Amino acid sequence: MSDSKKTTDHKEIQKWAEQHGGVPSVIKGTENDGSGEGVLRIHFPKKSDDNGSFDEISWDEFFKEFDKNNLALLHDPNGNFNKLVSRD
């Protein structure tokens, strides 16, 4: 996707997600025996039929795991496309 942007800026990520109706979430059942939150996602509950598969978490929790796992957000600044990727 040629219009995609990769960022690690917490404020930019939160602003983009909230503008598009996204919330910080983890996929249910992916927790690591208390050693981590689980698989992170930005979930769009108003645009999804699969809301039962996600647990919403705070932005603080999201960014703690985001940084701990050395992630970046690849996203379309004007759309909902997003993917968490390695910062490398």
Image: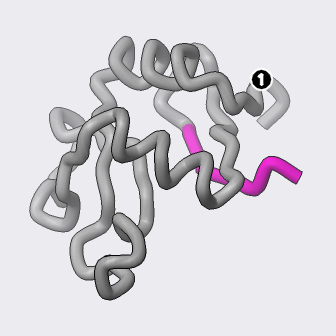
Where, quadrant-wise, is the N terminus in this rendering? top right
Residue range of the region highlighted in magenta in the rendering: 82-88
In magenta segment, residue 24: no
Indicate left or right for 25 with 73 as reference: left
Q: Residue furthest bottom?
A: 33
Q: Residue furthest left?
A: 52
Image label count: 1
Residue 3 picture location, percent across and down: 77, 23
Please, what is the dominant secondary structure of the magenta stretch?
strand
Compared to residue 22, the image places residue 56 above or below, namely below
Snapshot colouring: one colour
Indicate left or right for 69 with 14 as reference: right
Question: Residue drawn 76% across and 56% down?
Answer: 86
Residue 42 picture location, percent across and down: 40, 43
Residue 50 picture location, percent across and down: 18, 59
The residue where tag 1 is placed is 3
Question: Residue drawn 24% across and 46% down?
Answer: 57
As helix, strand or loop, the secondary structure at mark 1 comes to loop
Residue type for callout 1: Asp
Q: Dot 1: few (<14), some (14–19), or many (≥20) neighbours within 10 Å?
A: few
Compared to residue 58, the image places residue 64 above or below, namely below
- Residue 27 sits in quarter: bottom left
Indicate left or right for 56 with 8 as reference: left
- Residue 8 sits in quarter: top right
Indicate left or right for 67 with 63 as reference: right
Please tell me which residue lies in front, 4 or 9.
9
Question: Residue drawn 52% across and 15% down?
Answer: 11
Q: Residue furthest front?
A: 35
Compared to residue 77, the image places residue 54 above or below, namely below
Compared to residue 11, the image places residue 10 above or below, namely below
